[in-house]
């Protein structure tokens, strides 16, 4: 087995950025939506404004420089190249932490949190490892089936072993929550505990018979998701290749597909920019556009969407509920899946992209959770 870890640096040629601009210039736009809100998807005017800035105002080099500054690496695990950030605290006793993003996110979600997490003077500093999921960002694209969340969980444990970490913790939201939960269920050697900011747990029939207020809220959110917000997941979990052609070929198609989730899934007052900066949203889009991962990232839904809620975790676990999470799970449901739930907190602001939207709050939640596990 090749266990070599290689430094990785980005230097995207200007020709790639020029190509993006030409593809934007050649866009054939549809007519305006027939409603005055986002209920039919990303509005024409909102997308044209974002794409116009992408074409004429956005600077990719800032994101590229940040990725290089943090420190990027690749290693081959189970036949697939895995790209990851590795940022060590100057405190040698810091706790190693592996952070996992989801869709339609990327390692860009963690930029603002990495500095505080690795702060050597903090009460609980971390060494941060942030991989790109298989088929996402600059990780390799699986050429065969089988790269579901269980396999990714095992790969992450192998990554931490290769980095020399014998005691470590794991955290994630969205697909990151599924991978982190899989790690918790597998309980690999060295993993002291996990934290998720999207605990995935299902109700039982008795919960539906006499639901509490928290359960009623969760059931309403689940119904809304199923009726109005899950079209993307149905497409990606059943026909990822079909939708992938447009996502890989058209920057505007990719932006329209992803930008809507930045509005629907964040804690905002009506605009995605209430929660996330315009440049940050475009940084994230570039991590799909440049490596052409529209199809390969969608295939994770085909691999694992039906298994998202599988696996019982008995190692120490923690969860933070952010108020605008797309599918909240009451503590009662979560305790049945995370049977050693040592930390639970419901915070007052933030949405699905917790680390990205509220980095300070996210960091404080991780310190509170893992600090409790360490005693």
Image (cartoon, helix red, strand yellow):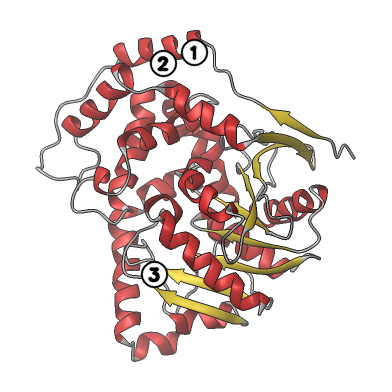
Identify the residue under disc 1. 16
User: How packed is label 2: few (under 14 Cα within 10 Å), some, or many (20 or more)?
Assistant: some
Please say if 136 is above or below 146: above
Q: For mark 2, what is the residue?
A: 20
Residue situated in front as seen by the camera: 5 or 151: 5
Q: Is residue 198 visible?
A: no
Q: Is residue 138 above or below residue 101?
A: above
Quarter residue 259 falls in: top left
The residue at the point 33 percent across, 88 percent down is 212
Classify mark 3: helix, strand or loop: loop
**Residue sitting farthest toward the right:** 1
Q: Secondary structure at mark 1?
A: helix
Residue found 39% across the figure and 46% down from its top? 232
Q: Which residue, given by chain and number where applicable, does mark 3 sit on?
A: 328
Query: x, y (%) of residue 111?
Result: 49, 43
Tags 2 and 1 touching, CB below 8 Å:
yes
Give the Cα separation between the discs numbered 3 and 1: 40 Å
Picture layout, residue 133 above or below residue 308:
above
């Amino acid at each position: 087995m090749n266990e070599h870890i290689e430094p990785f640096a980005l230097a995207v040629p200007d020709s790639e950025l020029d190509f993006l601009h030409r593809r934007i210039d050649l866009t054939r736009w549809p007519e305006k939506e027939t409603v005055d809100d986002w209920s039919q998807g990303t509005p024409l005017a909102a997308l044209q404004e974002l794409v116009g800035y992408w074409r004429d105002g956005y600077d990719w080099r800032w994101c590229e420089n940040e990725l290089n500054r943090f420190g990027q690496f690749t290693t081959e695990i189970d036949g697939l190249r895995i790209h990851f950030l590795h940022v060590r605290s100057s405190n040698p006793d810091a706790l190693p932490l592996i952070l996992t993003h989801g869709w339609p996110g990327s390692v860009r979600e963690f930029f603002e949190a990495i500095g505080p997490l690795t702060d050597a003077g903090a009460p609980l500093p971390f060494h941060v490892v942030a991989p790109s999921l298989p088929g996402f960002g600059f990780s390799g694209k699986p050429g065969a089936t089988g790269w579901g969340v269980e396999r990714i969980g095992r790969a992450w444990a192998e990554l931490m072993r290769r980095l020399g970490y014998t005691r470590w913790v794991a955290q994630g939201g969205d697909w990151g929550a599924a991978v982190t939960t899989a790690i918790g269920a597998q309980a690999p050697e060295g993993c002291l505990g996990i934290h998720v900011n999207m605990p995935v747990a299902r109700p039982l029939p008795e919960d539906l018979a006499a639901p509490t207020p928290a359960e009623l809220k969760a059931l309403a959110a689940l119904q809304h998701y199923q009726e109005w917000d899950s079209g993307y997941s149905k497409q990606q979990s059943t026909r990822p290749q079909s939708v992938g052609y447009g996502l890989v070929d058209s920057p505007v198609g990719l932006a329209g597909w992803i930008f809507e989730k930045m509005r629907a899934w964040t804690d905002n007052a009506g605009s995605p920019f209430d929660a996330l900066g315009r440049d940050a949203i475009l940084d994230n889009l570039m991590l799909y556009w440049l490596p052409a991962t529209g199809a390969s990232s969608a295939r994770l839904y085909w691999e694992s969407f039906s298994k998202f809620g599988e696996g019982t975790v008995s190692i120490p676990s923690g969860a933070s509920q952010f108020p605008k999470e797309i599918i909240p799970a009451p503590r009662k449901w979560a305790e049945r899946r995370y049977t050693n739930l040592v930390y639970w907190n419901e915070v007052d602001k933030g949405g699905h992209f917790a680390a990205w939207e509220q980095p300070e709050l996210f960091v404080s939640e991780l310190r509170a959770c893992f600090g409790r596990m360490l005693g």
